[in-house]
Amino acid sequence: MCVIGDFAWDVLIRTNSELLRGGDTFGEVMLTPGGSAANVAVWASRCGFITEFIGKIGRDRFGQLAQEDLDREHVIAHFVETEAHLTGSVAVFVDHTGERSMVSGHGADFYLLPSELPREVLRRAQHLHLTAWSFFIDPPRAAARAAALMAQRSGATLSFDPASFQMIGEMGVDHFLAVTQDLGIDILLPNKEEGTMLTGGLTDPPEIAAALAALYPGALIMLKLDADGALVYEAGAATPIPAGTNNLVDATGAGDSFAGGFLAHYLEHHDAVAAARFATTISAWVIEHLGARPEPDPRLRATLRG
């Protein structure tokens, strides 16, 4: 599997109590590796799946650390380096309830160009995963679309994560659909809020999934429902998947860990329901820890090996 998109460093700020406007409180401040696409690649690799990553970083210390990070995670990285932009960074605010909000800077990951794509890597990929963070603006939209079409022409399947309901709304649903519907997406991995945004306000998960299947014909719809688990919608049949836990500490990266786990399992075993159950176990563990990629403990390592 190959993943294309963003690698960024998360400046994670978690408060221990409600932060009042103009006020002060204690909490935790951490610098952790992130980026939605890179997170998916890492979690797929942790599940034992051979994974490659394509992205753009600055020729700076954070860029060096990015390469060291993916090497440590056994992800084969194909980084484009630039001196024109710094390696990406994201401010992640986690409130005292565990809910997170993000502010993404325009780092090097937003400036990937079609001419910079490693074509041989894309041509040999059996599956390509993309996130909408590569589609909200251009660049890097043209590069992501070119990569998808190149991989698809070589026989690869495609998966896509819509990434952010707010960014879809700011871009405009019609525009978003116009630049994604023609890609021939095989697996769509939205959360409920993104599904609601894309389907004109639907709130019932089976109805959302059915409407998304009509928007992306032939796609397996893997709807992430946070505390309510997930919903697999395949060939007109909806299968609910119960949540693994509701012990929310930090929601950062939960969807990415789900996507990485789901794709690693599904691409090997081709059973969407079993893959969703496996992925739910991983994302349930992630939300009980800080950061998008906490170091697996023995309990999770046993799950990943299974």
Image (tube, rainbow, N blue to C red):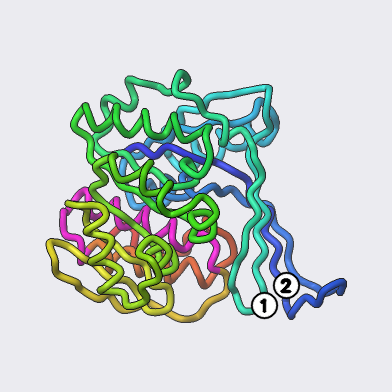
Left or right of residue 120, residue 100 in this image:
right
Q: Which secondary structure class fits the magenta region best?
A: helix
Q: Quadrant of residue 298?
A: bottom left
Q: Is residue 246 above or below residue 43?
A: below
Q: Find the distance from the CA under tag 1 to the CA under tag 2.
A: 5 Å
Residue placed at 50% from the left, 33% from the top? 140
Quadrant of the drawing holding the N terminus: top left
Residue placed at 73% from the left, 66% from the top? 28
Front-lying residue, 102 or 47: 102
Q: Is residue 38 visible?
A: yes
Q: Is residue 199 above or below residue 58?
A: below
Q: Is residue 299 visible?
A: no
Front-lying residue, 36 or 185: 185
For label 2, count other residues whose C-alpha is less than 10 Å away and answer few (under 14), some (14-19) or many (20+). some
Front-lying residue, 96 or 286: 96
Circles 1 and 2, Cβ within 8 Å, touching? The answer is yes
Tell me the kind of residue under disc 2: Thr
Residue placed at 30% from the left, 69% from the top? 208
Quadrant of the drawing holding the C terminus: bottom left
Question: Which residue, given by chain and number where applicable, does mark 1 sit on?
Answer: 96
The label number, if any, that marks residue 15 in the structure image: 2
The magenta stretch spans which residues? 251-274
Tell me the kind of residue under disc 1: His
Where residue 103 sits in the image (x, y, percent)? 65, 54
Name the element at disc 1: loop
Where residue 2 sits in the image (x, y, percent)? 35, 37
Residue placed at 46% from the left, 45% from the top? 37
